[in-house]
Image (tube, helix red, strand yellow):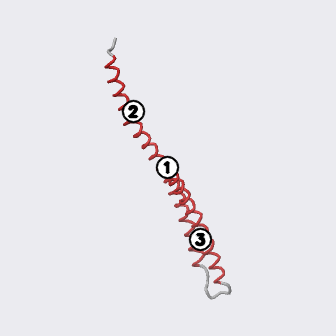
Amino acid sequence: MACPAAWGHGWGLGLGWLTTTLPAIAAAALGLRKYAEMELLAAQSARMIPRLRDAHRRIAAINPATPLASERLGSEALRTARHMLEETTGWAELFELKAAET
């Protein structure tokens, strides 16, 4: 039968291993989660590129000499601003959530 003093040594090693391993596993899991969230935001931002290109094309097509050109320009500017606000809202929500988690 094992000596009770050896039991304490075994528990100490086991607890030491757990206290170093579990935080490392938790940190790795958190890092993977954050990486996945950033990939989603990067994809969302990538979807903005065609929207901005389309806005640029529509704005460039406005002839300033035509009647109500400034209204068309204002309309395009408002549409573009809304698209950009939609994207930045996603970023803001993520960072507010992250601030609440810490």
Amino acid type shown at disc 2 = Leu
> With 73 as the anchor, is 35 left or right in this view?
left
Label 2 vs 1, first from the N-terminus:
2
Q: Are marks 2 and 1 in contact (CB under 8 Å)?
A: no
Q: Which mark is residue 81?
A: 3
Q: Which residue is mark 2?
A: 18
Q: Secondary structure at mark 2?
A: helix
| Gap between marks 1 and 3 measured at Cα | 27 Å
Amino acid type shown at disc 1 = Ala
Q: Are marks 1 and 3 in contact (CB under 8 Å)?
A: no
| Gap between marks 2 and 3 measured at Cα | 51 Å
In this view, the residue farthest toward the bottom is: 65
User: Residue 90's quadrant in the figure?
Assistant: bottom right
Q: Position of residue 70 (x, y in %)?
A: 64, 83
Amino acid type shown at disc 3 = Ala
Q: Position of residue 65 (x, y in %)?
A: 62, 88
User: Residue 22's quadrant in the figure?
Assistant: top left
| Residue at 61%, 81% in the rendered image | 62
| Gap between marks 2 and 1 measured at Cα | 27 Å
Q: Which residue is mark 1?
A: 36
Q: Secondary structure at mark 3?
A: helix
